Protein backbone atom coordinates (compact mmCIF):
# COMPACT_ATOMS: atom_id res chain seq x y z
CA UNK A 1 0.00 0.00 0.00
CA UNK A 2 1.37 3.41 -0.96
CA UNK A 3 0.92 6.32 1.44
CA UNK A 4 2.17 9.67 0.19
CA UNK A 5 3.87 10.90 3.36
CA UNK A 6 5.57 7.60 4.12
CA UNK A 7 6.64 6.55 0.64
CA UNK A 8 8.99 9.41 -0.31
CA UNK A 9 11.47 8.98 2.53
CA UNK A 10 15.25 8.60 2.57
CA UNK A 11 14.97 4.98 1.38
CA UNK A 12 13.16 6.18 -1.74
CA UNK A 13 16.04 8.45 -2.76
CA UNK A 14 18.96 6.33 -1.55
CA UNK A 15 18.10 3.05 -3.26
CA UNK A 16 16.95 1.07 -0.23
CA UNK A 17 13.33 0.37 -1.12
CA UNK A 18 12.54 -3.17 -2.18
CA UNK A 19 9.77 -4.78 -4.19
CA UNK A 20 8.84 -8.18 -5.56
CA UNK A 21 8.92 -8.82 -9.26
CA UNK A 22 6.33 -10.85 -11.15
CA UNK A 23 7.99 -14.09 -10.03
CA UNK A 24 8.01 -13.08 -6.38
CA UNK A 25 11.76 -12.34 -6.23
CA UNK A 26 12.70 -9.44 -3.95
CA UNK A 27 14.60 -6.72 -5.77
CA UNK A 28 15.93 -3.25 -4.92
CA UNK A 29 14.47 -0.08 -6.40
CA UNK A 30 17.08 2.56 -7.20
CA UNK A 31 15.21 5.80 -6.77
CA UNK A 32 15.62 9.15 -8.51
CA UNK A 33 18.62 11.34 -7.86
CA UNK A 34 18.04 14.59 -5.98
CA UNK A 35 19.93 16.43 -8.73
CA UNK A 36 20.27 15.80 -12.46
CA UNK A 37 22.56 17.46 -15.00
CA UNK A 38 19.88 17.03 -17.66
CA UNK A 39 17.88 19.80 -15.99
CA UNK A 40 20.25 22.20 -17.72
CA UNK A 41 18.57 21.33 -21.03
CA UNK A 42 15.11 21.62 -19.49
CA UNK A 43 15.84 24.98 -17.86
CA UNK A 44 17.32 26.42 -21.05
CA UNK A 45 14.28 25.40 -23.06
CA UNK A 46 11.68 26.47 -20.51
CA UNK A 47 13.37 29.84 -20.05
CA UNK A 48 12.76 30.68 -23.70
CA UNK A 49 9.15 29.48 -23.71
CA UNK A 50 7.76 30.80 -20.42
CA UNK A 51 7.41 34.44 -19.36
CA UNK A 52 9.82 35.53 -16.63
CA UNK A 53 8.23 36.05 -13.24
CA UNK A 54 7.28 34.02 -10.18
CA UNK A 55 7.31 30.25 -10.64
CA UNK A 56 6.14 27.40 -8.41
CA UNK A 57 7.63 23.95 -8.96
CA UNK A 58 5.13 21.44 -7.53
CA UNK A 59 6.82 18.23 -6.43
CA UNK A 60 10.14 20.02 -6.66
CA UNK A 61 12.20 17.38 -4.83
CA UNK A 62 15.49 19.05 -3.84
CA UNK A 63 14.77 22.05 -6.04
CA UNK A 64 17.42 21.33 -8.69
CA UNK A 65 15.29 22.38 -11.69
CA UNK A 66 13.93 25.43 -9.86
CA UNK A 67 17.47 26.51 -8.95
CA UNK A 68 18.54 26.31 -12.58
CA UNK A 69 15.50 28.39 -13.59
CA UNK A 70 16.43 30.96 -10.94
CA UNK A 71 19.69 31.47 -12.82
CA UNK A 72 17.61 32.17 -15.93
CA UNK A 73 15.79 35.04 -14.25
CA UNK A 74 12.75 33.36 -12.66
CA UNK A 75 11.72 33.96 -9.03
CA UNK A 76 11.33 30.31 -8.04
CA UNK A 77 9.63 28.49 -5.18
CA UNK A 78 8.89 24.82 -4.60
CA UNK A 79 6.49 22.57 -2.75
CA UNK A 80 7.42 19.02 -1.81
CA UNK A 81 6.05 16.21 0.38
CA UNK A 82 9.44 14.63 1.18
CA UNK A 83 11.17 15.95 4.29
CA UNK A 84 14.32 14.17 3.14
CA UNK A 85 14.35 16.00 -0.21
CA UNK A 86 13.84 19.38 1.45
CA UNK A 87 16.48 18.69 4.08
CA UNK A 88 18.91 17.90 1.26
CA UNK A 89 17.82 20.64 -1.13
CA UNK A 90 20.27 22.49 -3.36
CA UNK A 91 21.73 25.60 -1.67
CA UNK A 92 19.98 28.08 -3.96
CA UNK A 93 16.55 26.80 -2.87
CA UNK A 94 17.17 26.70 0.87
CA UNK A 95 14.09 28.15 2.57
CA UNK A 96 12.22 28.34 -0.74
CA UNK A 97 10.62 24.88 -0.65
CA UNK A 98 7.46 24.37 1.39
CA UNK A 99 6.76 21.02 3.05
CA UNK A 100 3.15 20.16 2.18
CA UNK A 101 0.88 17.39 0.98
CA UNK A 102 -0.87 19.08 -1.94
CA UNK A 103 -3.58 16.40 -1.97
CA UNK A 104 -4.74 17.94 1.30
CA UNK A 105 -4.97 21.38 -0.35
CA UNK A 106 -2.70 23.54 1.84
CA UNK A 107 -4.00 27.08 2.31
CA UNK A 108 -0.74 29.01 2.60
CA UNK A 109 2.70 27.79 1.61
CA UNK A 110 5.71 28.72 3.70
CA UNK A 111 9.38 27.89 3.32
CA UNK A 112 11.55 26.27 5.97
CA UNK A 113 13.16 29.62 6.81
CA UNK A 114 9.78 31.26 7.43
CA UNK A 115 9.53 32.75 3.93
CA UNK A 116 5.90 33.34 3.03
CA UNK A 117 5.09 32.40 -0.55
CA UNK A 118 3.03 34.48 -2.98
CA UNK A 119 -0.68 33.64 -3.13
CA UNK A 120 -0.36 33.17 -6.90
CA UNK A 121 2.47 32.63 -9.35
CA UNK A 122 2.93 33.59 -12.98
CA UNK A 123 3.74 29.97 -13.81
CA UNK A 124 3.23 26.57 -12.18
CA UNK A 125 5.25 23.58 -13.34
CA UNK A 126 5.26 19.95 -12.26
CA UNK A 127 7.65 17.34 -13.61
CA UNK A 128 6.91 13.69 -12.86
CA UNK A 129 4.16 14.52 -10.39
CA UNK A 130 0.70 13.79 -11.78
CA UNK A 131 1.33 10.07 -12.17
CA UNK A 132 2.09 9.97 -8.43
CA UNK A 133 -1.38 11.26 -7.48
CA UNK A 134 -4.16 8.74 -6.89
CA UNK A 135 -7.07 9.25 -9.26
CA UNK A 136 -9.42 9.98 -6.35
CA UNK A 137 -7.16 12.92 -5.39
CA UNK A 138 -6.46 14.16 -8.91
CA UNK A 139 -9.28 16.68 -9.35
CA UNK A 140 -8.80 18.58 -6.10
CA UNK A 141 -5.01 18.48 -6.42
CA UNK A 142 -5.11 19.79 -9.97
CA UNK A 143 -7.65 22.46 -9.08
CA UNK A 144 -5.32 23.64 -6.33
CA UNK A 145 -2.47 23.95 -8.82
CA UNK A 146 -4.76 25.88 -11.16
CA UNK A 147 -5.61 28.28 -8.34
CA UNK A 148 -1.90 28.96 -7.86
CA UNK A 149 -1.13 30.10 -11.41
CA UNK A 150 -2.18 33.33 -13.02
CA UNK A 151 -1.81 32.00 -16.54
CA UNK A 152 0.88 29.45 -17.44
CA UNK A 153 1.48 25.78 -16.68
CA UNK A 154 3.99 23.18 -17.81
CA UNK A 155 3.77 19.48 -17.06
CA UNK A 156 5.92 16.46 -17.69
CA UNK A 157 3.99 13.33 -16.82
CA UNK A 158 4.91 9.66 -17.12
CA UNK A 159 2.40 8.04 -19.46
CA UNK A 160 1.59 4.60 -20.75
CA UNK A 161 3.05 4.13 -24.20
CA UNK A 162 0.53 3.63 -27.01
CA UNK A 163 -0.26 0.35 -28.72
CA UNK A 164 -1.05 1.03 -32.36
CA UNK A 165 -2.65 4.41 -32.90
CA UNK A 166 -2.48 6.52 -29.75
CA UNK A 167 -5.60 8.34 -30.96
CA UNK A 168 -7.92 5.39 -31.53
CA UNK A 169 -6.89 2.20 -29.78
CA UNK A 170 -7.25 1.51 -26.04
CA UNK A 171 -3.97 1.28 -24.19
CA UNK A 172 -3.63 -1.99 -22.31
CA UNK A 173 -0.60 -0.71 -20.40
CA UNK A 174 -2.51 1.87 -18.39
CA UNK A 175 -2.75 1.14 -14.69
CA UNK A 176 -4.51 2.87 -11.85
CA UNK A 177 -4.00 1.92 -8.21
CA UNK A 178 -6.78 2.52 -5.71
CA UNK A 179 -5.91 4.65 -2.72
CA UNK A 180 -5.77 2.64 0.50
CA UNK A 181 -5.59 -0.71 -1.26
CA UNK A 182 -2.59 -3.06 -1.49
CA UNK A 183 -0.64 -2.91 -4.74
CA UNK A 184 -1.12 -6.07 -6.86
CA UNK A 185 2.05 -8.14 -7.08
CA UNK A 186 2.30 -7.73 -10.85
CA UNK A 187 2.50 -3.94 -10.46
CA UNK A 188 4.99 -3.72 -7.58
CA UNK A 189 7.90 -3.10 -9.96
CA UNK A 190 6.28 0.13 -11.17
CA UNK A 191 4.38 1.15 -8.06
CA UNK A 192 7.51 1.19 -5.89
CA UNK A 193 8.45 4.33 -7.84
CA UNK A 194 5.20 5.89 -6.63
CA UNK A 195 3.47 5.62 -10.01
CA UNK A 196 -0.16 5.02 -9.11
CA UNK A 197 -1.95 6.74 -11.99
CA UNK A 198 -0.26 5.98 -15.31
CA UNK A 199 -2.52 6.87 -18.23
CA UNK A 200 -2.36 7.59 -21.94
CA UNK A 201 -1.36 11.05 -23.15
CA UNK A 202 -4.00 11.52 -25.84
CA UNK A 203 -6.79 9.33 -24.48
CA UNK A 204 -6.62 10.60 -20.88
CA UNK A 205 -4.43 13.64 -20.20
CA UNK A 206 -5.34 15.79 -23.20
CA UNK A 207 -9.11 15.43 -22.51
CA UNK A 208 -8.46 15.98 -18.80
CA UNK A 209 -6.67 19.29 -19.42
CA UNK A 210 -9.45 20.43 -21.76
CA UNK A 211 -12.09 19.45 -19.20
CA UNK A 212 -10.34 21.77 -16.76
CA UNK A 213 -10.86 24.64 -19.19
CA UNK A 214 -7.22 24.87 -20.21
CA UNK A 215 -5.85 25.72 -23.64
CA UNK A 216 -3.07 23.46 -24.83
CA UNK A 217 -0.24 25.58 -26.21
CA UNK A 218 0.79 23.24 -28.99
CA UNK A 219 3.25 25.72 -30.49
CA UNK A 220 5.29 25.87 -27.28
CA UNK A 221 4.95 22.12 -26.84
CA UNK A 222 6.34 21.53 -30.34
CA UNK A 223 9.05 24.16 -29.85
CA UNK A 224 10.14 22.39 -26.65
CA UNK A 225 10.49 19.13 -28.60
CA UNK A 226 12.36 20.88 -31.42
CA UNK A 227 14.99 21.99 -28.89
CA UNK A 228 15.14 18.44 -27.56
CA UNK A 229 15.80 17.06 -31.05
CA UNK A 230 18.91 19.25 -31.35
CA UNK A 231 20.58 17.77 -28.26
CA UNK A 232 21.41 14.04 -28.64
CA UNK A 233 21.97 13.49 -24.91
CA UNK A 234 18.53 14.88 -24.15
CA UNK A 235 16.78 13.42 -27.20
CA UNK A 236 17.70 9.93 -26.01
CA UNK A 237 16.47 10.55 -22.46
CA UNK A 238 13.18 8.76 -21.92
CA UNK A 239 10.19 10.61 -20.53
CA UNK A 240 10.45 14.02 -22.21
CA UNK A 241 8.83 13.32 -25.57
CA UNK A 242 5.56 14.57 -27.09
CA UNK A 243 3.81 11.83 -25.13
CA UNK A 244 4.98 13.30 -21.82
CA UNK A 245 5.19 17.09 -21.98
CA UNK A 246 2.64 19.87 -22.43
CA UNK A 247 2.36 23.66 -22.09
CA UNK A 248 -1.02 24.99 -20.94
CA UNK A 249 -2.72 28.33 -20.53
CA UNK A 250 -5.79 29.45 -18.68
CA UNK A 251 -8.56 30.73 -20.93
Image (spheres, rainbow, N blue to C red):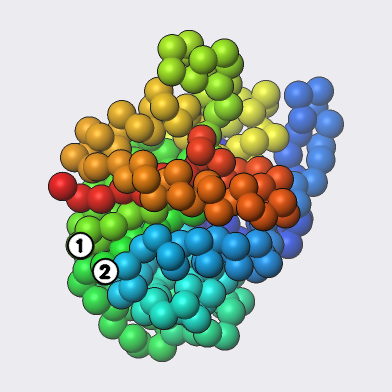
Query: Does 36 appear above or below 116?
Result: above
In the figure, is residue 176 to the left or right of 136?
right
Q: Are marks 1 and 2 in contact (CB under 8 Å)?
A: yes
Task: For mark 2, give the secondary structure.
Answer: strand
Residue 159 visible to the viewer: yes
- Give the quadrant of residue 48: bottom left
Task: For mark 1, give the secondary structure.
Answer: strand
Lower sequence index among marks 1 and 2: 2
User: Who's the residue at 41% across and 88% down the image?
Assistant: 113
Query: Does 2 appear above or below 228?
Result: above
In the figure, is residue 15 to the left or right of 73?
right
Give x and y (percent) for residue 238. 66, 43
Q: Which mark is residue 150?
A: 1
Give x and y (percent) for residue 231. 67, 55
- Residue with the most extreme left position: 251
**Residues under labels 1 and 2: Cα distance?**
6 Å
- Give the quadrant of residue 153: bottom left
User: Who's the residue at 48% across and 73% down the image?
Assistant: 69
Circle 2 residue: 121
| Quarter in which the N terminus is drawn | top right
User: Who's the residue at 38% across and 33% down the image?
Assistant: 205
In the figure, is residue 185 to the left or right of 104?
right
Of residues 40 and 156, which is closer to you in this image?
A: 40
Query: Does 8 appear above or below 70?
Result: above
Residue 193 visible to the viewer: no
Amino acid sequence: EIKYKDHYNDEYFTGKKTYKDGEGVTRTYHGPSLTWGGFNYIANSLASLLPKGTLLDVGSSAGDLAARLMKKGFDCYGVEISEYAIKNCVPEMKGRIALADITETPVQLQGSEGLTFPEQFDTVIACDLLEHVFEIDLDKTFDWMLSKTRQNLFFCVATSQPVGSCFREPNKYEFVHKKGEPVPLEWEATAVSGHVNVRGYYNFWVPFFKKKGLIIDWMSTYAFQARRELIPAWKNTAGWSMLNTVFLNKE
